[in-house]
Image: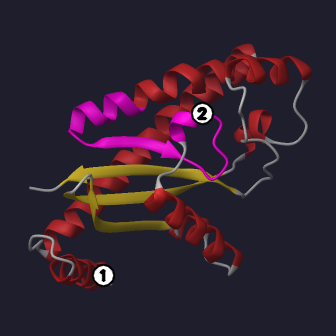
Amino acid sequence: MRTLIAAIMAATAMASGHPAIAADDIEARVEASRAVAKDFAQTLQQALQTALATDGPVAAIEVCNVAAPAIAAQQSSAHGWQVGRTSLKPRNPANTPDAWQRTVLTRFETEKAAGKPMAALESWEVVDVDGKPAFRYMKAIPTGEVCLSCHGSNLVPDLTAKLAALYPADQATGYTLGDIRGAFTVTQPLP
């Protein structure tokens, strides 16, 4: 099935005027993007769980404020890609979705509402980015139990104050377990 999807993507890329991209190249890019998103998720979750266990939710905010952008920068540098997170309700304005990301996130919400499993919510496409072809990938981030300390509805006052200080335009609260928190996003430039 994945090979069929990759072949369709390659044909779509050619039809849209992008250079010919072999189906196996698309499949390799999808697998590499999945691996980067998984590594980002695991590294961030481990740092958050450690901060929550040792110092509580206010310390976890510092992890997202400092460590998450550092993890994204490290992944971006290591691969020569743009790696990050985005959300329809961003906490950090630097993570506000662009038009393509917003379309994908909205589609994820529709697919989840129709019963598609969270683990299956991913998307990839060859698109123009600043006039150049690029392979783009997104993987939905589920709201887990650990997320609710800082993204749920019942936040402690110290945490609310810290969020207001770091993120005055914060939109990333009110989530419940299993909501789509956002997505990991990978952009790979194409030759």
Which residue sits at x=42%, y=29%?
Answer: 71
Classify the position of the N terminus by image quarter: bottom left
**Residue ID for mark 1:** 5
**Residue ID for mark 2:** 92
Q: Nearer the viewer, residue 103 or 144?
A: 103
Q: What is the x, y in percent for residue 165?
A: 73, 17
Q: Nearer the viewer, residue 171 or 76?
A: 171
Q: Nearer the viewer, residue 119 or 104?
A: 104
Q: What is the x, y in percent for residue 48?
A: 62, 28
Q: Identify residue type, mark 2.
A: Asn
> Looking at the image, is mark 2 or mark 1 earlier in the sequence?
1
Q: Secondary structure at mark 2?
A: loop
- Which stretch did the figure color magenta? 72-95
Position of residue 130 relative to residue 43, above or below, is below
Which of the 4 image quadrants contains residue 140? bottom right
The answer to whether marks 2 and 1 mark residues whose Cβ atoms lie closer than 8 Å is no
Which residue sits at x=59%, y=27%?
Answer: 64
Which of the 4 image quadrants contains residue 110? bottom right
Residue 159 visible in the displayed image? yes
